[in-house]
Image: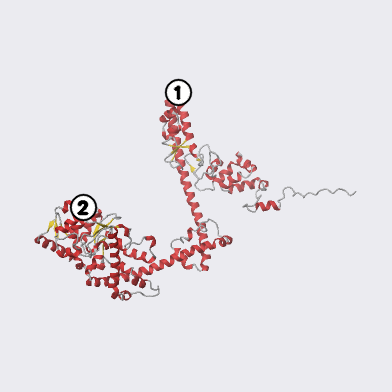
Amino acid sequence: MAPKKSKRTKASAPAGRVTAKTEARWKNVRGRRGGLQDMLNMPIDVIQEICLYLHPRDLLSLSRTSKSFHTFLMQRSSAYLWKGSIKNIVDLPPHPEGWIEPAWISLIFSPYCTACGTGKATTVYWEFLARFCARCRPQMVVATNRVDKILNSDQWRNFHWIPKDIFLTAVEVTGFKGPCYSQSQVFEAIDTYGKLYAAGKWDSARKLGDEDIKRARRSREHAILCQKWAEKEEHLHTEEVEAVIRERLEDIASRLRPLGWGLELDFVRGRNYTPLSEHKHVRVAKKLTERVWQNAQDELVQCMKHIRKERLEHEYEAMLTARWSVLKSAGGEMLGRFFGRCPELMDYGIGAEDLALFKEFRDIMFAPADEVVDRAHFLALEGQLDTLVEKWRTRICKHLRGLLSKHKIKSPRGVDPLDLATTLFEFTESSFPRIEPFPNVIAPNALRFPTPRTRRDAYEKVVYWQARADLSFIGTALKPLKPNDFVRRVIQLCGKDPDTATAREMDALDVRLVSDEIVTWRGAVVKAAKCEPHNVLNWRLADAHEIIEVKEIEMRILTTAKVWTCTRCEESRMPVARDIVMEHLCTEHGIARSEIVDGDVAMNETLASSVLMGCRIGIYYLKCTQR
C-alpha cells in the first residue's frame, strides 16, 4: 500500500523579512520604512549630538515615534538636549515659570488641543498658555460679560469682590464676541478668595490680590512677547512659502514660453502674472516635477487662452481710445457747423459720443489696427450727418411717444404729443429726481444710453468711459407726467389753450412770469409740475419794463458764457455761466462752495462755439440769476 501523501503548506516568510505583499501595501506610504530602527544601536554620544542639531519640532516628533525614544528623551538627564534644540530657534521667549522644555515645545509646535489632546487647534492663546479645539472651547473659556451665566449666586457674589486685574484675558477667541477669561482661573480664584472672604481675612485677600496682580502682569508681558514671536514666525513662513511658489511660477512660465505664450506672459508680468499666479496648480509650495507638469499642462493652457483674450481686448481698447480723440475733434467740428444750420436741434444735446455709436462712425473706428485713422475719415461723413441725426432723433421720439401712449396721455388729433407745451417727463430712478420738458429730456444720457453694463460690447465700453456717460439710468426710469391744474393754469395765464398750445407757440410769445423770481414759461411749467401752488397762484405776466431788464441780464450772461456741465447729474449741456452751475451744485446737491472741485464742473468744448444759438433754452436754465 502506497504511503499516504501529506498536505503541503506554503513556506512562511522568515521572521523580520519584508514580503512582496508588505511592499505593495507600503507603496502609497511616504518616507522610508524602518529608517530609524537602528538609531538606538548607535553610540549614545552620537545620538546626543544628532539631537542637539534637530529643530524642537523634529525632536518632539522623534520622542513620539516609539517608547524607547520617548523614555530616552523624557528622562531628566536629557533635559540639556531640549534646551540645546530650543537655542536653534531665534528670539523664542523663555518657557513660563514651572514649565519644562518638552511641555513648552509641545504647546508651540503640536497642533492639538491641550484640553482633550485629540482635537485640532491651530491657535495658541498665549494668555492662557493653551490651545483649545472647537469642541472644548466653550468649556474652557467664558466671555467677560457672560461670567454670571456659569456661576451660582454665592460664586457670583464672591466674584464681584475679586480684583479683575488678576484675571488673564484673551482679546480674540474664535466663536466668542469680546474678550474672554479662562474658566479654570475663574473657578480657582472664586474658591481661593471665597474661603478668605468667608473667614473674614480681608487683609490676606488683599495681599493675595496684590501678588496675583503682579503675577498676571508678568504673564501678560510674556504673552505679548510670544505673540510677537509667533507673528514674526508666521511672516517668515509665509515668505518661505511664497518664495517656493514664485520659483514654481517662474518654472511654469519658462515651460509656457516655448509653447507660444510669450506675449501673454509679458502682458501679465507687470501684475505678477495674475491670473496665472492665482491658478490652483501654481499656488502649491512644492517644486514642479515633470509628472506634475504633464498633468497640469492642459489646465494651464486654458488659463493662458483667457489671458490671450484679455490681451487682445486690451490692445483693441487702446486702439479705440487713441482713435476716440480724433473722432471727438472731428465730430465737434461737424456738429458746430450742423448746429449753425439747425440750431433748434441743440436742445437734443447730441454729442460726439452719439456720433460714435452710429454704424457709419463705428465702422471707421473698427478699421484694422495697422490702418491710420485721421480726421479726414470722419469728416467725409459730414454729408450724411443730416440723415444720421434725423434717423437718431426719429428713433428717440418714437420711444417717447410710446411712453406717452403707454401711460394713456392723450393729445388732439393731428398734433404730435411731443410738440405740446404741457408735455413733461420725470426721471424716477435718479438720486435727484427731476422734471424736464421735451426735447430737454433727451439731453441727459439717461435715454440715449439705455444698454445695461453687462450687455455692452468692448467698443461701447470705450465710448461710455471716454464720454463719461456711464450712468445707471435705463429707459424705464423715464415717466411722462399728466398735466395737472397748475401746469394748465400757467398756459392759460399766457393766453393759450393748455389742451392744444404747442411749445413753439409758447416760445413765440416771448413772455416772462413773475412771482418771487422771473422765469420763462418753461421754468414756470416745471415748477407747476412739482405742485408748488405758493408760486403758481402768485404768478403774473412780466410787464415790458421787467422783460427788458431781464433780457439785458440774460444777454450779458449768454455772451460771456461757456458750456459748463454739472458732472454729478449731467444737469446742463446748455450754455450757462460757470457760476450758474456752481449755484446749482449748492442748491440742488447741498455742496458748499468751498467744497466744489474741478471734477464737479466740466466744460463741453463741442458746444462752446455755439453759445448764442442756444439762447432760447439757455434762458430756461438761467432762472437762478433772475431773482
**530 or 260: which is nearer to us?**
530
Three-letter amino acid code of the residue under disc 2:
Cys
How many other residues sit within 10 Å of disc 1, few (<14), some (14-19) or many (≥20)?
few
Secondary structure of residue under mark 2: loop
Q: Can residue 473 be seen at all in this image of the molecule? A: no
Name the N-terminal-most of marks 1 and 2. Answer: 1
Q: Amino acid at mark 1?
A: Ala
Q: How is the image coloured?
A: secondary structure
Residue at coordinates 51% horizontally, 60% vertically from top-left?
A: 249
Task: Kindly indicate the quadrant of the structure image that contains residue 488.
Answer: bottom left
Read off the residue under disc 2: 531
Left of 178 or right of it: where is 520?
A: left
Location of residue 298 by image quarter: bottom right
Q: Say which element carries label 1.
A: loop
Q: Position of residue 604 (x, y in %)?
A: 26, 65
Spatial CA distance of label 1 from label 2 is 82 Å
In terms of depth relative to the viewer, which is nearer, 186 or 578? 578
* Front one among 311 and 621: 621
Mark 2 Cα within 10 Å, few/some/many (few <14, many 20+)? Answer: some
Q: Check disc 1 and report the residue beneath it.
A: 199
**Percent x, y of residue 252:** 52, 62
Residue 148 in view (yes/no): yes
In the current view of this chain or complex, which residue is farthest to the front? 413
Q: Residue at x 49, y 53 (%)?
A: 238
Picture coordinates of residue 465, whole percent (x, y): 34, 63
Q: Residue furthest left?
A: 545
Q: How many circles with numbers are drawn on the protein?
A: 2
Up/down of 154 relative to 219, above or below: above
Q: Quadrant of the C terminus?
A: bottom left
**Mark toward the viewer: 1 or 2:** 2
